[in-house]
Amino acid sequence: MTARKYLLFFFVFMICNKVAAQSIEDIFATVVYFETDSLQYKKINEQLFEIWLKKPNSDEEMPLTNKIRGSGFFVTKNNRLFLVTAQHVAESFNHSTRITIRKGNDEPFILLLFAQKHNPKKQFKYSDDADVAVMEIFPDVKILEILKGHFLPIETLNEKEEAPKREKTLNIIGFPLGLGTEKKFSPITSEVKPASGLLELLRFDNNKKCIFFLIDKPSVGGFSGAPVFDLAKPFSDMSGLIITGGPIKCVGLVHGTISDDTGGKFGAIVPSFYIVKTINKFFE
């Protein structure tokens, strides 16, 4: 093994054995924010054309773009490093996609997710059924140093095909509307309750049937792909008995919002067993 490879192995080993989430603050470093500039198009005579505008006080033109936002998180298994998000978020990625992670002292650290030689669409493995995308990452030594303490052990994810108990309180951690990514790295948390068991519903992005569980609040733009945690707080069951929570668990990721024309809205969550299955594809 060369000295460089040994150094990389050592850093990865240290990263993969450092994380031990005991509180919600411990988890903040594991979540990431994505921002992608997506070109806007106009349809003319059944053909799509990019929209370009002149810069103010200049003859120079620039393309008109939308910012597509999403959240994700880091996971490690067998000393290998993975980035997890929703498939509908990952499919919007291009070479402009930027990722924001936490550096020391809650400083945001921004870097391009893809080198020009990489095809963003081919970097991910997707779930066969669910809105899950996973990419294995190979950071250089400088980035690895920043990423110490940023990875959830795979054991943190619930691999059972089940929904959280209704009595539980869950926390979504991510970046709705891109909040919490400037000056200070401060992910937004939303406390929610499970509103269903496992249900088969249609995905909003491709209309395929998939298993979800619902929560009692709708999602917000930018929360897609964000992890949902059971922080293992004590809770009361139906008899009023106080039950002590176990270890912190990631129970899923945010897919989107289920709604109708009456104004009723629920958040749809992809159960975490789909995430575990997708990560396991890298070991087949």
Image (cartoon, grey):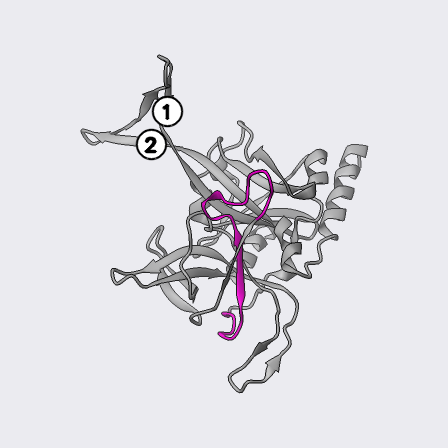
Earlier sequence position, callout 2 versus callout 1: 2
Q: Does the magenta stretch include residue 175?
A: yes
- Asked if residue 127 shows in the view, the reply is yes
What amino acid is found at the position of numbered circle 2 in the picture? Answer: Gln
Q: Quadrant of residue 280?
A: bottom right
Q: In which quarter of the image is residue 136?
A: top right
Query: Tag on residue 63?
Result: 1
Q: Does the magenta stretch include residue 180?
A: yes
Q: Is mark 2 on a helix, strand or loop?
A: loop
Q: What element carries label 1?
A: strand
Farthest-out residue, bottom: 239
What amino acid is found at the position of numbered circle 1 in the picture? Answer: Pro
Farthest-out residue, top: 59
x 72%, y 35%: residue: 141
Q: Position of residue 218 (x, y in %)?
A: 40, 59
Query: Tag on residue 161?
Result: none
Contact check, label 2 and label 1, Cβ < 8 Å = yes
Q: Where is residue 260 in the image (x, y as percent from the top left)?
A: 28, 61
x 57%, y 53%: residue: 279
Q: Which of 75 and 71 is in front in this view?
A: 71
Q: What stretch is highlighted in magenta?
A: 162-186
Q: Where is residue 143 in the image (x, y as percent from the top left)?
A: 68, 36
**Residue, disc 2:** 40
Task: Quote the CA–CA distance across marks 2 and 1.
Answer: 8 Å
Q: Residues within 10 Å of mark 2 (few under 14, many from 20)?
A: some
Quick check: 205 left or right of 197?
left
x 35%, y 56%: residue: 208
Q: Where is residue 12 in the image (x, y as percent from the top left)?
A: 73, 44
Quick check: 8 left or right of 198?
right
Q: Which of 282 and 198 is in front in this view?
A: 198
Image vertical order of residue 272 relative to residue 108, above or below: below
Quick check: 30 left or right of 13?
left
